[in-house]
């Protein structure tokens, strides 16, 4: 590990030190600040920003670690950065094969940085690096994957079923998987899996990771629909990917909408993957993703392939729900009941990457009419999300006096001719913040659905006001901490004087 640390770029070492601080890791000389106090007598921990320290100092600190779990953690960070370097090569370098050009289409899509920026250094993640890059870049082998997930008691998703097929649609992997934690919801109506199905299952996530890693070891391209969802639940970091939700263009020109797998199959292949209301089938979905990729190659990767997406009706049970998203973690379920009128149950949704200190929740009513009435009576600024679904920006004042904002959204558009949610939009909110997308590509903002200009301005003003309130609260807390520190400094100074006085008397 010492040799890898010595040759690593400084930005990699900075990342390693920052993450060690975040995890509270300690080497032989303590944590980062303790190390600095002993290593650098001149500045000590007074200059603790890793980015302002030399490569030599950063390396010296990282070499104080010897525990196997710490070294594995640091090694994963190095491997992750190696993949990010490879990612840039895949984007910039010209390759001849249509399969590789599909990879480039995926990597260059404006939504890629948002969807695929999940962490890959947490416990249980597997980073698949590409060895002999010049050779694997020429590989045209492809496999398609599809996964089903259950909701666990800790609010996270866990893999319960996985299927992988090759370009000939031959099955390479088809397994039920036993999660290693308690399951709160099997989502049987979607996954087709019940508790009885898992009674004799012994296959683990680690087993699946090992099998898929073997399939991808020679640079095989991984295909999937909204593939970031599958990679996240598989806990796999891999960069040679093709996302079929990215590679076709809608006739309306929108790049913000991820078409569902069923819609794409109807538009491109001329058939539905599943009947209305039927559970997902991993094998069918993996085959469908592979067929879509092959259809794009046959048509011509560089040729325009615009499609008209078929409507997908939202079930009555889903229409009896409202989605609350971008909820600050300071807002509890009791507050949600104050914001949304009526009687309902609350189902918390797992946090998605990029949400930061926010979470999402479904509020479930007895029937669609009650959900509709509740939405009408919610006090907020009416607008639409990127799919055209009605939502309201709500500002609420907490008992602490701080104002918070969140969104309350219907599960489908009011007009039947409009578009509807994507593959997992009913399970996880797929809305993308236009302002975030504009940071990736300024041109995106021009294509974004605008709705009412006044609503957009009002919503931004409300968000700014809420942020100002949070900033004022933070400033008050900082000022209070400063006063406490001043008082502590005074007390310490007095103690030093007392000690000095006692020493003189002795």
Image (cartoon, rainbow, N blue to C red):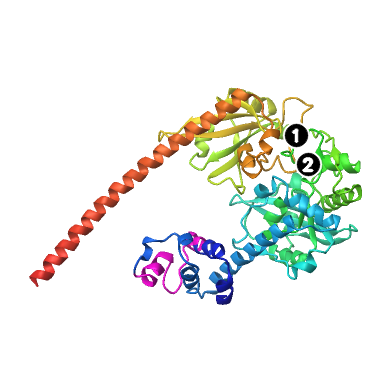
- Mark 1 closeness class: few <14, some 14–19, many ≥20 residues within 10 Å: many
Q: Label 2, on which residue?
A: 260
SS assignment at label 2: loop
How far is the residue under mark 2 from the one under mark 1?
9 Å
SS assignment at label 1: loop
Lateral position of residue 477 relative to residue 60, left or right: left
Q: Quadrant of residue 414?
A: top right
Residue 203 appears in the rendering: no
Q: Label 1, on which residue?
A: 420
In the depicted view, which residue is nearer to us: 270 or 187? 270
Of the residues under marks 2 and 1, which one precedes in the sequence? 2
In the depicted view, which residue is nearer to us: 417 or 285? 417
- Mark 2 closeness class: few <14, some 14–19, many ≥20 residues within 10 Å: many
Give percent across and percent down for residue 492: 23, 58
Give percent across and percent down for residue 377: 58, 23
Give percent across and percent down for residue 77: 59, 64
Q: Quadrant of residue 121?
A: bottom right
| Residue 34 painted magenta | yes
Which residues are the magenta region?
A: 18-41
Residue pictured at 68% horizontal, 38% vertical: 443
Callout 2 touching callout 1 (CB < 8 Å): yes
Residue pictured at 25% horizontal, 55% vertical: 489
Measured along the vertical axis of the image, is residue 171 above or below residue 116? below
Residue 417 appears in the rendering: yes
Give percent across and percent down for residue 361: 60, 40
Residue pictured at 56% horizontal, 72% vertical: 5
| Residue 375 painted magenta | no
Q: Which mark is residue 198?
A: none
In the depicted view, which residue is nearer to us: 355 or 83? 83
Q: Quadrant of residue 495?
A: bottom left
């Amino acid at each position: 590990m010492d040799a890898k640390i010595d040759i690593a770029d400084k930005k990699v070492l900075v990342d390693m030190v920052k993450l060690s601080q975040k995890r509270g890791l300690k080497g032989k000389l303590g944590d980062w600040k303790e190390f600095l106090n002993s290593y650098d007598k001149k500045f000590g921990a007074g200059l603790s920003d890793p980015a302002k320290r030399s490569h030599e100092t950063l390396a010296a600190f990282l070499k104080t670690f010897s525990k196997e779990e710490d070294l594995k953690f640091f090694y994963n960070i190095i491997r992750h950065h190696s993949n990010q370097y490879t990612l840039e090569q895949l984007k910039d370098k010209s390759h001849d094969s249509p399969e590789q050009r599909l990879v480039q289409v995926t990597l260059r899509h404006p939504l890629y940085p948002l969807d695929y920026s999940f962490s890959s250094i947490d416990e249980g993640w597997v980073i698949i690096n590409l060895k002999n890059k010049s050779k694997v870049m020429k590989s045209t082998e492809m496999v398609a994957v599809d996964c089903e997930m259950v909701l666990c008691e800790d609010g996270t998703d866990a893999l319960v079923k996985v299927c992988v097929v090759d370009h000939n649609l031959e099955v390479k992997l088809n397994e039920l998987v036993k999660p290693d934690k308690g399951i709160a919801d099997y989502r049987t109506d979607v996954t087709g899996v019940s508790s009885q199905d898992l009674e004799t299952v012994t296959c683990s996530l680690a087993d699946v990771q090992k099998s898929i890693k073997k399939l991808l070891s020679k640079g095989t391209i991984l295909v999937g629909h909204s593939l970031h969802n599958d990679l996240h639940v598989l806990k796999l970091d891999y960069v040679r990917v093709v996302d079929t939700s990215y590679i076709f263009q809608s006739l309306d020109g929108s790049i913000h909408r991820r078409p569902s797998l069923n819609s794409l199959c109807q538009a491109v292949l001329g058939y539905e993957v599943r009947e209305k209301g039927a559970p997902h089938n991993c094998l069918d979905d993996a085959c469908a993703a592979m067929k879509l990729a092959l259809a794009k190659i046959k048509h011509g990767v560089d040729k325009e392939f615009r499609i008209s997406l078929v409507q997908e009706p939202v079930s009555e049970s889903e229409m009896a729900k409202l989605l609350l998203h971008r909820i600050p973690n300071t807002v509890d379920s009791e507050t949600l009941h104050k914001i949304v009128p009526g009687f309902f149950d609350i189902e918390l949704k797992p946090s998605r990457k990029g949400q930061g200190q926010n979470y999402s929740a479904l509020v479930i009513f007895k029937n669609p009419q009650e959900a509709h009435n509740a939405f009408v009576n919610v006090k907020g600024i009416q607008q639409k999300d990127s799919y055209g679904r009605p939502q309201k920006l709500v500002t609420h004042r907490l008992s602490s006096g701080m104002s918070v904002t969140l969104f309350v959204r219907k599960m489908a558009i009011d007009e039947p001719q409009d578009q509807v949610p994507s593959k997992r939009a009913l399970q996880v909110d797929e809305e993308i913040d236009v302002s975030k997308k504009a940071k990736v590509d300024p041109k995106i903002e021009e294509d974004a659905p605008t709705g009412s200009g006044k609503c957009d301005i009002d919503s931004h003003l409300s968000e700014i006001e809420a942020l100002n309130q949070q900033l004022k609260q933070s400033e008050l807390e900082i000022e209070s901490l400063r006063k406490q520190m001043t008082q502590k400094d005074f007390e310490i100074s007095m103690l030093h004087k007392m000690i000095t006085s006692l020493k003189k008397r002795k």
